[in-house]
Image: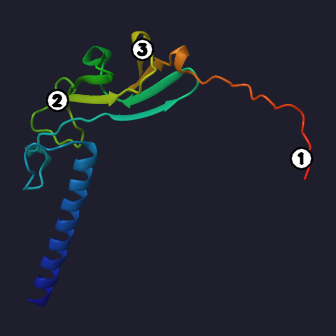
Amino acid sequence: MLNTFVTNDVRQTLDQFRRSVDQMFENFYGESSQPNTRGTSAEANWTFRPVIESGWNDHFLSLRAILPGVAEKDAQVTVQNNQLILQGERKAPEGWEKNAFTQMTYGKFHAAVTLPSGLDVEHVRCQLRHGVLDIQVPILEASKPKQVQIETGEGNKAISA
């Protein structure tokens, strides 16, 4: 009887740990629109969220979105109201069985990045290669840093006391 209590306690602890880890990954990789109460992924309806990173140099603001399994025709980039909007759909492979088990997320996605002022949004370039979307937004010449000459004053004057 004690063995049964210990086994049940271990199962409850492991089940609680599994739910915590599932919730952590759910918050990181996508949202489930239906709670997954029985622990089977077939019941969950996941939303794909691309991971986006950014950086800049003297000439471009660079953004990179990780879109594994997304075809060029299934992704769209627009600039509107000083926001860069990335949207599209990550489709399940053709012939994918309805009763298959997967931990991958599929579906429509949408991400918006607010752009800083001083960018040339008319000349945005995008390239999708091997599931990575690289976006470059040129920096306007007027917004680039300019070197300012520091002038020296006239020679040192002696101060009399």
- According to the picture, the residue beneath numbered tag 2 turns out to be 96
Seen from the viewer's position, the closer of residues 30 and 85 is 85
**What percent of the width, then of the height, locates residue 84?**
33, 23
**What percent of the width, then of the height, locates residue 99?**
10, 38
Label 3: state its secondary structure.
Answer: loop
Specify whether 20 is left or right of 116: left
112 shown above or below 14: above
Q: Amino acid at mark 3?
A: Val
Q: Amino acid at mark 1?
A: Ile
In percent of the image, x 28 and y 14: which residue is there?
73
Specify whether 145 is left or right of 65: right
- According to the picture, the residue beneath numbered tag 3 turns out to be 124
In percent of the image, x 60 and y 24: which residue is there?
145
Seen from the viewer's position, the closer of residues 4 and 144 is 144
Q: Is residue 42 visible?
A: yes
Q: Amino acid at mark 2?
A: Trp
**What percent of the width, then of the height, locates residue 95?**
16, 25
Mark pair 3, 2: CA separation: 36 Å
In percent of the image, x 31 and y 27: which residue is there?
69
- According to the picture, the residue beneath numbered tag 1 turns out to be 159
Q: Residue furthest top?
A: 122
Q: Answer yes or no: do the residues labelled 3 and 2 have beta carbons within 8 Å?
A: no
Lower position in the chain sequence, tag 2 or tag 1 = 2
Mark pair 3, 1: CA separation: 59 Å
Seen from the viewer's position, the closer of residues 136 and 101 is 136
